Each structure stands twice: as structure tokens, then as C-alpha cells.
Image: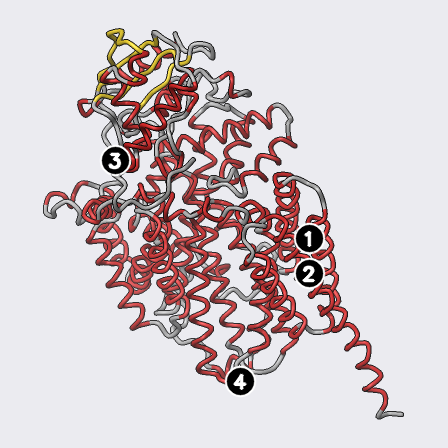
């Protein structure tokens, strides 16, 4: 009888595993069926996604312990039910996107909540120190932002004004109590290139104060995004410093031990290693000195990043997620590198860390689309580190936990990114960004000159020296390698698509600031006076014109200092007043141009000169202007609604800001207007000219004869012919 007991007990376990396997197969089949419905023109997609789901589900079935297997089976069954229901439904694609978007946000919120309540963390007794440090950081960054904006009289354009206007939209919906519309807009934006997520925090504050105020917009950017972003950079620099030397913990002079515990010591004290609260360093004992120092070092090493936030761009907030992903990746590697034993507990922790990492990656993608390059960089660095540990450990490596983490991450990301897949799979070419954004590529000399202004060759050299120092000094280089490799991969992938703009440099900001901040922190640990002197010298080079007295341009950055105000602000104010007095939905005033001096969008952005009128219109028919096309491969031929423009303001000379070969959609109609040919034959100059900076004139034309569909079709054909003449060597196809 005793011999039969194990066999009898194992029967339910086998049945549960068989049931979970069947649910996993059902999930894979349902995913394939749904993909076949939404992407019938891409026959490989159903097989690829179905097999991916099958492999991930099978990996979990093979590696999960019994206690977690029943929950996995239920999750597989629920996912199969949802996917199959969507595949069999008659819902339109946009309805599926909305449904999956709501489900995705719900899954992310519930999973994050479960992780938070299960962490077991409590507020430490020294929380007041963190509060004081945060308040000081917010005050310093806020003061910097006020000085920057006032000194430069900064005029927000392009992406900067876009997120301010989205925040106005959020505030408007909140004020009107239109929560369903706000949620719907957020869900719809999940698949777009510009998510509404960064606009939520400023939108809430603007709704409670002044919806059009720049101060009400930028204050929450500093509090919610800039300060946490700088703090995250400081935490990363501190973590790297801890692995390379001794840091003071408090004013009493306590310090971190330089040597880490050996493998045997970690195994003997395994309970501490497996504590859910273990974070690779207990910051609760730190005083204010080291955290404040490393945060100041992050600002001094990359002041341009703070300047971008001061100008109103929320992208700096993604650094919190970026650094969190790096630290979670390191913790996952640490768990996988533990010696044998405590398998059930290690497995549970691996699942928690893998889930947290997947949620962080999703949040990076949702916050700003291009942070996906950083997510791929972290994943690549993580894979290399796991491979390195596996090569060293061999058969003793935790293969089971590794497969479990990978399978869980794949399934969670498939679920979270389901609305994006529903939108992208039917036409993958519409998201071929290497082709779409080919116009944004600049010659290498131009790009390197911009890097000199944004970062500085001297700062880059200092970061390389810091990397060499840390690699030689660190007793544990995992986090250092993760940080450096992730930045290199992210930068390489982004450069394959386009030349970055200044805000895209957040992809390398963690590596840049940590490689400088960590050695400075170690110097501060040895001698506070020497550390403060070195930090002051760095800040003098990057935040003041001091370096210009002895070094050529490009050695030290200049973008962290306020730029000179536009020389034509008075003329822009006159242009705004002139347009406001004439533009109506029945008498539209439009612009042709695409430079930072003058563009069609500039006319719609002049409201910020006098924050009294909302830039939003509930109905597109109420707009007193027309949004013109700027880039051939992104927006296609000239906007057909151009025919509704009663007044046309044209930049002279023709204004472009990218490779002109990709901006025929601006050049062709602008030249016709200035020459009085084509569509220009339907307009006449009225003699009004606005004299802008850099020798650019904004010339006003009034329509004398209506433009019809035939005129716009002819303009499109002339645009196609012009593009064909310059098409040699261009990337990207013509948009219809």
C-alpha cells in the first residue's frame, strides 16, 4: 500500500499538468486564429505568433511548480477564451483595438498592484530624509527651469508644444467630467507614435488650476518627471560606485564594504539573498550627502537633459523606467546565479522579477515609443549576461528558472502589447520607421557637431575614462555591463532609423551620467572636499561659458545654458494678432514652410504668446487653419484641404528643416505660390510681409479664384514628378 501512495498522489499532479498543457495549446491556437483574422495578408504572422505563444505556454507548464500551475492553466484558458472570442466576433478592427487596449491597461494595473502589495516593503524610519532630498531636488530643478525659460523666452514648437496641447486636451476633458472620452483617447494612443500617457500628470494639474498656463504645465513635469528622472540617474551612479569602492552612508562616516560576499557566503546566508525586500543595496541608512551628490553629478554631467525638460518635454520621465529595467535585469541575473537550493522560493522570486521587468518594458513603450530601443538594449544585455553565467555554471546553472522567466515575460508582453499588434499586423510596412523617417537622417559631420553642443567631446572622454576606471575597480561588473551594453545597443538601433534629436539622447543618458557620477562619488567618499571641488569644476564646464575661454566649441556642451531669445518675437506677436483678426473656419489662414524659423504649424503655435485662447477645436471643421504635410514618406502629398485656405502665408526663401529631397510636399506648393504658377495662379500678393529672423520673410497671399479637386489632383501629380526627379538613393516609398 505504501508503494502505491506516491503513484496515487502523482496522478492529480499529472492531470493538472496535462490540463495546463491543453489550455496552453488552446491559447496558441486562439492567438493564431485571431492573427489570421486581423492580418490575412501576412500568412506567416499567425504561425509565428501562435508558435511563440505555444513555446511560452509550454515553457511555463514544464517549469512551474504545482502551486502556480493551476493559476497558469486558468490564465491560459482565459486568454484562449478572449482571443478566440475576438477571432470569431464581427467587431471592427478599431473596436478590437479599444477592447484589447482597455484589457491591457487593466492587466498592467492589476499586475503592478499585486507586485506592490506582495513586496512586503514598509516606509522606513528615515523617510523624512528622502522627502527632504526630493523637495530640494524639485526646488533646484524648478529654479533652473524658471531661469531657463525667462532668459531664453523659449517658444515651444513641434513635439514640445504637442505634449502641452495634449495636456490641454486632458485638462479640458477632466474639467468637463468626460472620463470615458479621456480613457478612450489614452487607449487609442497606445498604438500611435505619440501616446497620451506623458500628458496625464500635467493635464490633471492644469485641470485643477489653469488649463492654458505654461507654469501649470511645467510644474508637474518637474515634480513628476524631471526630479524622479534625475533621482534615478543618481541611484544608478550610486549603485555602480558601491560595486567599485567605499561610500559614506551618513554623517557619522559609515561606509559600504568594498568586497562582496563570496558564493559560499551567499549560499550560507541565502535567506538574506532571497528576501523579497533585497534590492542590491539598502538605501534606508543613507544620509543626504551621497544621494544629493550623485544627483548633482548627474545634472552636471548631462545638463542638456534637464534643459529639455525645462523647455517642456516630458521624456525625461522615462529614465525612471529605464533605470528600473536595468536594476531588475541585474536582480534577475543575481537570482539565476544563486547556487542550488531553495528552488521553490527562488522560482517565485524569479517570476516576480520577470513580471516586474515585463511591466517596466511595457511602461517604457507606452510612455514614449522610442524608449523601445532602450528596452531592446536591456533585453540584449540581459541575454548576454545570462549566457555568460550559463557558460560558467554549465549543468549547475538554473536552466529551469531561466526558461520560466523567459516564458512568463513573452506571454505577459504579448498580452500587454495586444492592441499594438492588432493595429500593426495588418500593415507592417506602415510602421517601417527606417523608411518613414529617412528624411530625418543628417550627415555625420552635422550630427557630430550637434553632439558637441548637446553633450561635449570632453564630457564623452570623461565618461570613457570613468568606464575604464569602473571596469578595473568593480568587484561585480554586471550592472556596469548591463548599463553600457544597453546604451550601445539602443543608440545603434536608433541610428539605424534616424539621426536623433536632443531628447532622444535619454537613450544613452544612464550610461553617460553613471560613468561620470560613480567615480565622482568614490572621490567624494575618500574626500568630501575633493569630491565637491571636482563636481564644481564639472558644473563650471557644462553649465557656464567658462570652458569657451580656453577650449574650442564642441569640447563642452552649450545646450544646458539658456539659448538666446528669438530675434523676431515682436514680429511673431504682430503675425499672431494679424492672423487672429482674420482667421475663421470659413476664411482659413494657412502657412507653407517647414523650418524652425517659419512653418505652417508655427501659426497654430502662436497662441502661447498670449495664453488666453485654447488651441483645441472640438470639431475639425472649426479649425481656422489647415495642417500641412511636411515629410513625403510620412505624410505624403500636399494636404487636399489646402484648397480651403483663403489666406496663404509662405516662407521666402522656401523653408525646409530636413533633407529637401524628402520635403517636396512643402517645396512644390511653396515654389508655385511664390512664382504665381500652379496653385499660385489662384492667389495674389497683398503686400503684407512679416520679417522673421535669419532673413526669412513670411509673405501673405490672398485667394482670388477657388481651388477644386482637379487643381489638387494636378498638384499631387506635380509633386510626384518632382519627387521622381530626386528619387535616386532615397529610402521610403511614396505615400498614397
Disc 2 on helix, strand or loop? helix
Disc 3 on helix, strand or loop? helix
Disc marking residue 27 = 2
Q: Is residue 464 visible?
A: yes
State the colouring used for the structure image: secondary structure
Q: Do the residues under discs 2 and 1 have CB atoms within 8 angstroms?
A: yes
Q: Which residue is mark 3?
A: 660
Disc marking residue 396 = 4
- On screen, residue 139 versus residue 725, left or right, reads right
Q: Is residue 439 above or below residue 110?
A: above
Q: Residue at x 35, y 35 (%)?
A: 632
Sooner in the amino-acid sequence: mark 2 or mark 1 = 2
Sooner in the amino-acid sequence: mark 3 or mark 1 = 1
Sooner in the amino-acid sequence: mark 4 or mark 2 = 2
Q: Residues within 10 Å of mark 1 (few under 14, many from 20)?
A: many
Q: Which residue is mark 1?
A: 83
Amino acid at each position: 500500500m505504501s508503494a502505491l501512495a506516491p503513484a496515487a498522489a502523482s496522478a492529480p499532479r499529472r492531470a493538472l499538468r496535462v490540463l495546463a498543457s491543453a489550455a496552453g495549446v488552446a491559447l496558441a491556437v486562439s492567438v493564431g486564429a485571431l492573427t489570421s483574422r486581423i492580418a490575412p495578408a501576412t500568412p506567416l504572422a499567425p504561425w509565428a505568433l501562435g508558435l511563440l505563444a505555444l513555446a511560452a505556454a509550454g515553457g511555463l507548464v514544464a517549469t512551474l511548480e504545482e502551486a502556480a500551475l493551476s493559476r497558469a492553466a486558468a490564465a491560459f484558458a482565459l486568454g484562449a477564451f478572449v482571443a478566440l472570442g475576438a477571432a470569431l466576433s464581427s467587431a471592427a478592427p478599431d473596436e478590437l483595438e479599444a477592447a484589447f487596449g482597455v484589457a491591457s491597461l487593466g492587466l498592467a494595473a492589476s499586475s503592478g498592484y499585486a507586485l506592490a502589495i506582495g513586496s512586503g516593503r514598509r516606509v522606513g524610519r528615515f523617510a523624512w530624509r528622502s522627502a527632504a532630498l526630493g523637495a530640494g531636488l524639485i526646488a533646484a530643478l524648478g529654479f533652473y527651469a524658471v531661469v531657463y525659460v525667462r532668459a531664453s523666452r523659449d517658444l515651444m514648437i513641434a513635439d514640445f508644444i504637442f505634449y502641452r496641447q495634449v495636456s490641454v486636451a486632458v485638462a479640458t476633458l477632466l474639467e468637463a467630467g468626460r472620463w470615458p472620452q479621456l480613457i478612450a483617447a489614452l487607449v487609442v494612443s497606445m498604438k500611435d507614435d505619440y501616446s497620451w500617457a506623458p500628458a496625464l500628470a500635467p493635464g490633471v494639474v492644469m485641470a485643477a488650476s489653469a488649463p492654458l498656463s505654461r507654469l501649470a504645465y511645467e510644474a508637474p513635469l518637474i515634480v513628476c518627471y524631471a526630479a524622479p528622472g534625475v533621482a534615478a540617474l543618481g541611484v544608478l551612479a550610486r549603485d555602480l560606485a558601491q560595486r567599485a569602492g567605499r561610500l559614506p552612508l551618513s554623517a557619522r562616516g559609515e561606509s559600504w564594504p568594498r568586497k562582496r560576499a563570496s558564493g559560499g557566503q551567499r549560499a550560507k546566508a541565502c535567506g538574506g539573498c532571497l528576501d523579497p525586500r533585497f534590492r542590491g543595496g539598502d538605501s534606508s541608512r543613507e544620509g543626504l550627502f551621497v544621494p544629493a551628490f550623485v544627483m548633482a553629478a548627474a545634472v552636471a554631467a548631462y545638463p542638456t537633459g534637464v534643459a529639455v525638460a525645462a523647455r517642456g518635454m516630458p521624456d525625461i520621465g522615462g529614465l525612471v523606467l529605464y533605470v528600473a529595467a536595468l536594476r531588475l535585469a541585474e536582480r534577475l541575473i543575481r537570482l539565476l546565479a544563486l547556487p542550488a537550493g531553495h528552488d521553490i522560493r527562488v522560482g517565485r522570486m524569479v517570476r516576480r522579477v520577470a513580471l516586474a521587468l515585463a511591466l517596466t518594458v511595457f511602461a517604457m513603450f507606452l510612455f514614449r515609443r522610442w524608449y523601445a530601443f532602450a528596452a531592446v538594449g536591456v533585453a540584449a544585455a540581459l541575454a548576454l549576461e545570462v549566457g555568460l553565467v550559463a557558460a560558467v555554471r554549465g549543468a549547475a546553472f538554473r536552466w529551469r528558472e531561466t526558461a520560466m522567466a523567459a516564458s512568463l515575460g513573452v506571454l505577459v508582453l504579448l498580452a500587454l502589447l495586444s492592441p499594438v499588434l492588432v493595429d500593426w499586423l495588418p500593415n507592417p510596412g506602415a510602421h517601417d520607421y527606417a523608411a518613414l523617417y529617412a528624411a530625418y537622417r543628417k550627415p555625420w559631420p552635422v550630427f557630430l557637431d550637434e553632439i558637441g553642443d548637446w553633450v561635449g567631446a570632453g564630457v564623452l572622454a570623461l565618461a570613457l575614462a570613468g568606464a575604464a576606471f569602473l571596469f578595473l575597480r568593480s568587484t561585480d561588473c554586471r550592472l556596469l555591463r548591463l548599463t553600457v551594453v544597453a546604451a550601445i545597443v539602443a543608440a545603434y538601433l536608433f541610428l539605424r532609423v534616424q539621426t536623433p534629436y536632443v531628447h532622444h539622447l535619454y537613450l544613452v543618458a544612464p550610461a553617460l551620467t553613471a560613468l561620470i557620477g560613480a567615480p565622482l562619488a568614490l572621490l567624494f567618499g575618500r574626500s568630501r572636499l575633493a569630491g565637491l571641488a571636482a563636481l564644481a569644476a564639472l558644473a563650471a564646464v557644462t553649465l557656464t561659458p567658462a570652458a569657451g575661454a580656453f577650449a574650442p566649441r564642441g569640447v563642452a556642451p552649450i545646450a544646458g545654458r539658456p539659448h538666446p531669445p528669438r530675434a523676431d518675437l515682436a514680429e511673431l506677436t504682430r503675425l499672431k494678432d494679424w492672423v487672429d483678426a482674420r482667421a475663421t473656419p470659413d476664411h482659413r489662414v494657412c502657412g507653407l514652410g517647414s523650418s524652425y524659423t517659419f512653418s505652417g504649424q508655427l501659426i497654430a503655435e502662436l497662441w502661447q504668446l498670449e495664453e488666453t485662447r485654447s488651441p483645441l477645436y472640438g470639431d475639425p471643421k472649426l479649425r481656422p487653419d489647415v495642417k500641412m504635410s511636411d515629410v513625403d514618406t510620412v505624410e505624403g502629398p500636399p494636404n487636399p484641404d489646402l484648397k480651403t485656405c483663403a489666406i496663404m502665408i509662405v516662407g521666402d526663401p522656401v523653408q525646409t528643416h530636413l533633407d529637401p529631397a524628402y520635403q517636396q510636399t512643402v517645396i512644390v506648393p511653396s515654389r508655385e505660390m511664390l512664382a504665381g504658377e500652379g496653385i499660385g495662379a489662384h492667389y495674389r500678393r497683398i503686400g503684407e510681409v512679416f520679417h522673421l529672423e535669419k532673413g526669412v520673410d513670411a509673405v501673405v497671399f490672398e485667394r482670388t479664384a477657388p481651388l477644386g479637386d482637379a487643381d489638387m489632383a494636378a498638384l499631387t501629380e506635380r509633386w510626384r514628378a518632382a519627387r521622381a526627379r530626386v528619387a535616386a538613393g532615397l529610402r521610403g516609398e511614396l505615400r498614397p
